[in-house]
Image: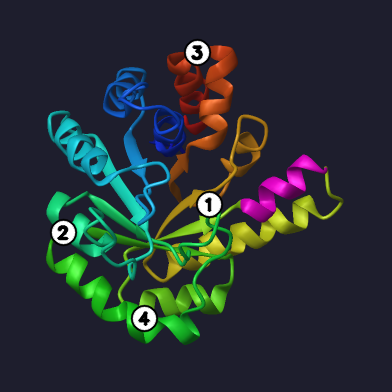
Amino acid sequence: MAFALSVNLNKIALLRNSRPGNYPDVVAHGSRCLAAGADGLTVHPRPDQRHIRPDDVRQLARLVAANPGIEFNVEGNPFAQKLGNFPGFLELVTETRPHQCTLVPDSNEQLTSDHGFDLTTAGNRLAPVIRQLKDQGIRVSLFMDPDLAQISLARDIGADRIELYTGPYAAACRRRAANLDDLFQDYCRAATHATRIGLGVNAGHDLDLDNLPKFAGLPGLLEVSIGHALIVDALALGLEDAVRAYKKCCS
């Protein structure tokens, strides 16, 4: 079954931020990704603005609004507060109203997202945030490990979807781990359980052209968010052909 490809633009913004000015233009490259067949765009604004900036989120929201059928996904730490001209994560999401908000348990000090939520400790704090976002018509997804008990808690606190953290699967693929098939089956069980209890299933983190074809067999998969690997592949293939190659895996 086909599933959606949402292109994460963080790495294009990171390259832009290494020099003054707006080169490369994040919005222009987002438009190129859509023209090449991407189903949506993802960004992860952080208070330190190491890559995506608040104005990027605003401009991309307008770009997506001008392209019916395309989805905008804003991911990040729901408890990230105002810092300089960063208005706070929830404030930025409320302003730009993406189709989907993926909540991620990352701190300002983390290089990248590297684990799912532990809802036994974070659930009570997340529940009112989820209600607030859903009241605005925003679909809410929680970044989760393939843990069935935790996924049940995601349903209990009101999430619409989960995004399975695929870092361990990608690492196992890279080293050709003997337990790769067992690990993949853990993800399959998690996805099947999520679907059974009424949650949609997304996935992301370190998925690439080598490991995505196997992961495409995940039951009920609705969407993958891919940035780092796609931009790396674009160095060799060109941006449009890289998007098309990933879209082929999704189809």
- The three-letter amino acid code for the residue at tag 4 is Asp
Q: Are marks 2 and 1 in contact (CB under 8 Å)?
A: no
Q: Earlier in the sequence, mark 2 or mark 4?
A: 2
Q: Are marks 3 and 1 in contact (CB under 8 Å)?
A: no
Query: Is 45 positioned to the left or the right of 181 in the image?
Result: left
Residue indicated by mark 1: 219
Q: Which residue is pictured at 55% across the width and 53% down the height?
A: 111
Q: Secondary structure at mark 1?
A: loop
Our reading of the magenta stretch's main secondary structure is: helix
Residue indicated by mark 2: 94
Residue indicated by mark 4: 156
Considering only vertical position in the picture, is 145 above or below 30? below
Q: Nearer the viewer, residue 174 or 146?
A: 174
Q: Which residue is pictured at 46% across the width and 67% down the height?
A: 105
Magenta-colored stretch includes residue 171: yes
Residue 49, horizontal then vertical, whole percent: 37, 48
Of circles 2 and 1, which is in front? Answer: 2
In terms of image quadrants, where is residue 196? bottom left
Measured in 3D between alpha carbons, the distance from the residue under mark 3 to the one under mark 1, in whole angstroms, is: 31 Å
Q: Which residue is pictured at 56% across the width and 17% down the height?
A: 235
Badge 1 local density, few (<14 within 10 Å), some, or many (20+)?
A: some
Q: Earlier in the sequence, mark 4 or mark 3?
A: 4
Magenta-highlighted residues: 167-175
Q: Earlier in the sequence, mark 4 or mark 1?
A: 4
